Amino acid sequence: MEKISVTIITKDEEQLIEDCLKSVSWADEIVVVDSGSKDTTLKITKKYTEKIFFNEWKGFAAQKDYALSQTKNDWVLSIDADERVSDELKKEIEYIDFSKFDGYLIPRENYFFKKHITTCGWGRDRQLRLFRKSKTKLTDRLVHEGFDVDGNIGNLKNPIIHFTFNSIEKTISKINQYSTLEATEKYKTKKKITGRMILTHGVSSFLRAFVSLRGYKDGVHGLMISIIDSITTFLTYMKMWELQNKD
């Protein structure tokens, strides 16, 4: 088995970080990049690794790229504070033939308020998280950043466990953050935004998640996720409109 470095970026993750770190305590190296936590995140993290770095926040991709630069091993597993490596995934990684591929897609099992969600497109979630650093670079995106591997990509069967939103207050905060980033990114297209576009995109986002992707099958959880998707889309296009009218 190749030696593996794990990277995690943090800021004020005291409620989530310990379980995350426990799930990767088997790794040869854990690198944590923090952007200024004010809670007990760093105190908890120090129990699991000495490789803790401060980096001023410049965006998700920039933070993860900096974390990669601090790792000593070529093989890297990138996870977030609200994710955990399942025991089954750990065992699967232990038996990988690392000579076959340069990166691996890993399924992600998503939970919303403690419920495993299989609708709204969440059941088809696969993330490229395990890769050879020397053949990988971050995608140039402000939000929904990812990794591009210059080589062959394989698939693992067992999941990363992902605990998404666990409070409405934090959900609203993330919606605001993500919609701002997405609006800034999409605004580069210079596509003129009208009131009709704001309305149709927002409504379509809800219908796609709740009806087309069968969010209704997950009951109130699916309804809430569909509403969150819709609000995020509404805000994204409203913020794009706002940017246009500042020119």
Image (cartoon, rainbow, N blue to C red):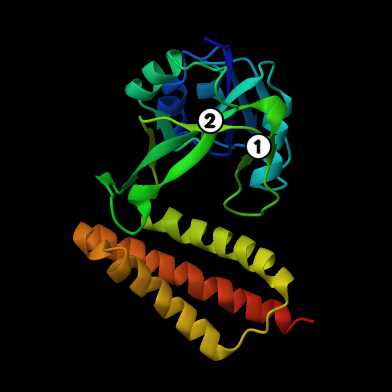
- Reading the image, the residue beneath label 1 is 64
Instruction: State how many labels appear.
Output: 2
Position of 133 compared to 112: left or right? right
Furthest residue in direction right, as rendered: 247
Q: CA distance from mark 2 to mark 1?
A: 18 Å
Residues 66 and 214: in front is 214
Position of 38 compared to 161: left or right? right
Residue 240, quarter of picture: bottom right
Badge 2, how many Cα within 10 Å: few under 14, some, many 20+? many
- Reading the image, the residue beneath label 2 is 41
SS of the residue under disc 2: helix
Q: Is residue 46 above or below residue 105?
A: above
Residue for point 40% across, 47% down: 164
| Residue 62: x %, y % from top left | 71, 42
Q: Quadrant of the C terminus?
A: bottom right
Residue 195, quarter of picture: bottom right
